[in-house]
Amino acid sequence: MEAACRLAFVEIIDLIADGYGNIDVACPECGPSRRSPANQRRKTLRIWREESDFARYYCVRCEVKGYARRDDGCAPIDLTQVARLRSDAAARNADREEEQHRKANRLWRSARPAQGTIVQTYLIARGTTALFP
Ligand SMILES: [Zn+2]
């Protein structure tokens, strides 16, 4: 079977519970052959689903990779569509990164000295001997 067809679209949709975005799940290709239950369930397969009829996947453990379309077709994909999807994903990632920076700045600005707070009590209870800001 061609690499792009290893996982059927319906199987991918089942794995991600019809979700969208970047989703990590247990790999159905290599997970079941693992001895330990934790490794069987380890989320090594990343699925990228940006639109309702198309998803890509890659497993960091067994390196199975490919894509699937709702029609389960395995014909070469439209490179223009791939470029558009990558562009859309880059824009979403840029928005997400900007939001994370705003959140980090907001948290940093709201920080207060630990001296005399429950944080100091906690850190002392954990054995911290450092000076508190
Ligand atoms: Zn795998």
Image (tube, rainbow, N blue to C red):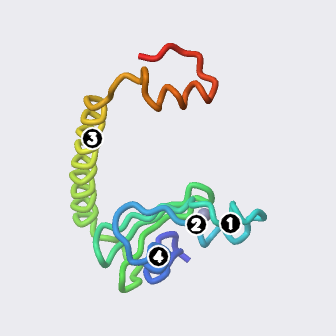
Q: Nearer the viewer, mark 3 or mark 4?
A: 3
Instruction: Identify residue for label 1.
Output: 40
Residue 12 in the image: x percent, y percent?
A: 46, 76
Rendered view: 77 above or below 60: below
Q: Is the Cβ of the residue at disc 3 closer than 8 Å to that at disc 4?
A: no
Quadrant showing the N terminus: bottom right
- Closer to the chain start, of discs 3 and 2, is 2
- State if disc 2 and disc 3 touch (CB < 8 Å): no
Residue lying furthest right: 35
Q: Which mark is residue 75?
A: none
Specify the amino acid type for callout 1: Gln
| Mark 1 vs mark 3, CA separation in Å | 35 Å
Question: Looking at the image, is mark 1 or mark 2 earlier in the sequence?
Answer: 2
What kind of element bears circle 2?
Answer: loop
Label 2 sits on what residue type? Ala
Residue at the spot of label 4:
12
Give the residue pinned by disc 3: 103
Q: Is 104 on the left-hand or right-hand side of 121?
A: left
Q: Earlier in the sequence, mark 1 or mark 3?
A: 1
Task: Report the residue at 46% width, 67% height from top.
Answer: 66
Judge: label 2 CB < 8 Å from ligand 1: no
Residue bearing the label numbered 2: 26
